[in-house]
Amino acid sequence: MTISIIVGVLLLVGLAATVTSMSRKNHPNLKLTKEKIPDHLGTVNFVPIQSLLLHLNTALNDEYIRKVKQRFLQENPTKSEDEFEWLLFELKRYFIVANLLKKAPMFSKEVDEIWHEMILFTEEYHAFSEEFLGEMLHHIPNTNPEPAPQDRAFFDWVFAQLFQITEFSWKTWGSFFQHPVSHESLKEFKKSSKEELINNYFRQNDDNKELVEYLVHRMKKQLTEAENIYMVDKKGLFTKQQTYGDMTSLSLTMVFFSYYYFDEYWEYAKVYSFARAVKDTSGCSTAVFCGTASTNRSGDGHGDGHVDGGGSSCSNCGSGCSSS
């Protein structure tokens, strides 16, 4: 009888351990805690972003976010408060990018869900848009089933100049640096004046002026560095990224192979790629093209400049999200 009881207890312990293990595999966000969210949106050192961060925090008042959080958790009972905070963290980063770029695609279905919840509070969302951008920030849903590899590449480059890329960022946005930056755009950044580039690619306001000029300077500098590297070694001289965090050095690798080996980009870039959100051999990201932030009232969601149809054969972007 005693042996039977012991065996029974061991079986129950084993079953409990198995259930716990399966639960953790099915909920990879269990390790997320809001206390680990980086301060100041995890911005890279020496980036002149403080004015824009302050403006964003002022525009997003606490009561508005509390209501968004409450509704999101009610609509998504399997999500934790910590996961909401991490997704909000990434959405705030996206809003910074949307403040900077004329065209800012949304490449995360999970982050996009928080954006949708915000839009449902129409009065508060309108007030936020007007405060942060001076006009309404529309969500233009993606209705084109085709991927947008060059849009994603430029998004990745800008994101990496501004923010540290955490493990959560990599999983939520999908793998970074999988696609080459448009070769035409790189040539334009090489040859055009600062004023022309700002007019073609960026929004302009008092809060982002210094940061926009910084991004133009960074791209021009990386293109010069790429040329210098090419003169020494046609295949590049780079170090493989070893950790999450500041990935501006990997963005230089991205610029180099986009500029000199656009058609074979992934063949070369994958040697230095830090990680992949999904273990596969395709080199494709798991990101979903959900839509575009736009203040364009005509509703096409397009800015001037950096769209290029060439490059990647990956078809990883879904048909997108419904309009809010």
Image (cartoon, rainbow, N blue to C red):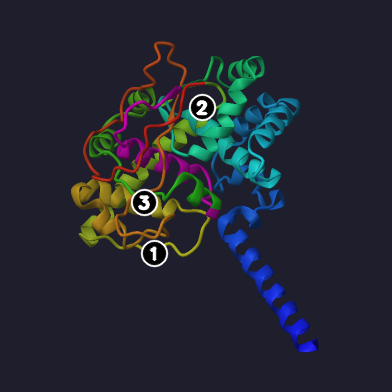
Q: Amino acid at mark 2?
A: Asn
Query: Can you give x and y, in whole percent of width and height, for residue 130 in the image?
Result: 59, 16
Q: From where the camera sits, is residue 203 visible?
A: no
Q: From where the camera sits, is residue 188 visible?
A: yes
Residue at image x 21%, y 49%?
260
Query: Is-magenta flag for residue 323?
Result: no
Instruction: Report the residue marked by disc 3.
Output: 252
Q: Quadrant location of residue 89?
A: top right
Q: Quadrant location of residue 136?
A: top right
Work out whether mark 2 precedes mark 3 in sequence or the reverse, and give the earlier one.
2
Using residue 74 as the reference point, say whether residue 105 is left or right of it. Answer: left
Residue at image x 55%, y 33%?
113
Query: Can you give x and y, in whole percent of width and height, for residue 203 in the image?
Result: 45, 23
Instruction: Report the residue marked by disc 2.
Output: 99
Instruction: Report the residue marked by disc 1.
Output: 240
Query: Can you give x and y, in whole percent of width and height, for residue 313 in the image?
Result: 23, 45
Pick whichever, 167 or 195, lies toward us: 167
Work out whether mark 3 precedes mark 1 in sequence or the reverse, and give the earlier one.
1
Q: Amino acid at mark 3?
A: Leu
